[in-house]
Image (tube, rainbow, N blue to C red):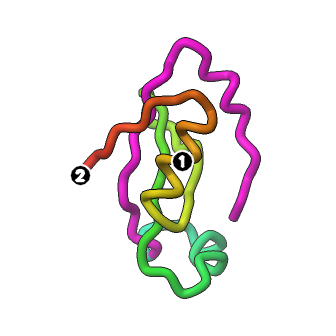
Amino acid sequence: MNTPYDFDALAGDDIVYVRAVEVSDLPKDVQLQAQGLEQLFAVHDASGERLALVKDRKLAFMLARQNDLAPVNVH
């Protein structure tokens, strides 16, 4: 479930959006990798492209900040 993403390609677009995603709404191959979790957290760029899926909100924010991005929570 950990797929490398070139966060450097986002230069200039420093805001990313973090939102909860139901595992049941994801493709079957991703569901199988979710290891029994019902919810994951997605990090999206301004255009809506999903950059990452992680197991919890705290990790999503940490990932964004480690890549010099400003995470914003989306409900």
In terms of image quadrants, where is residue 12? top right
**What's the residue at 44%, 30% (across, down)?**
70
- At label 2, counting other C-alpha atoms closer than 10 Å, the crowd grade (few under 14, some 14-19, many 20 or more) is few
What secondary structure is marked by label 2?
loop
Q: Nearer the viewer, residue 70 or 25?
A: 70
Query: Most extreme residue toward the top, as rendered?
Result: 12
Q: Which residues are magenta?
A: 1-23
Q: Nearer the viewer, residue 74 or 61?
A: 61
- At label 1, counting other C-alpha atoms closer than 10 Å, the crowd grade (few under 14, some 14-19, many 20 or more) is some
In terms of image quadrants, where is residue 2? bottom right
Label of residue 62 in the image: 1
Query: Most extreme residue toward the left, as rendered?
Result: 75
How far across and down, in percent of the image, does residue 43 sit?
A: 49, 46
How far across and down, in percent of the image, does residue 25 sit?
A: 42, 69
How far across and down, in percent of the image, does residue 54 sit?
A: 56, 60
**What's the residue at 66%, 72% (across, down)?**
29
What amino acid type is highlighted by mark number 2? Answer: His
**What's the residue at 59%, 77% (across, down)?**
34
Would you say residue 18 sits in the magenta stretch? yes
In terms of image quadrants, where is residue 21? bottom left
Say which residue label 2 marks. 75
> Where, quadrant-wise, is the N terminus in this rendering?
bottom right
Looking at the image, is 14 positioned above or below residue 56? above
In the image: residue 28, left or right of residue 58: right
Between disc 1 and disc 2, the foreground one is: 1
Marks 1 and 2, how far apart at CA = 18 Å
What secondary structure is marked by label 1?
helix
**What's the residue at 76%, 46% (across, down)?**
4
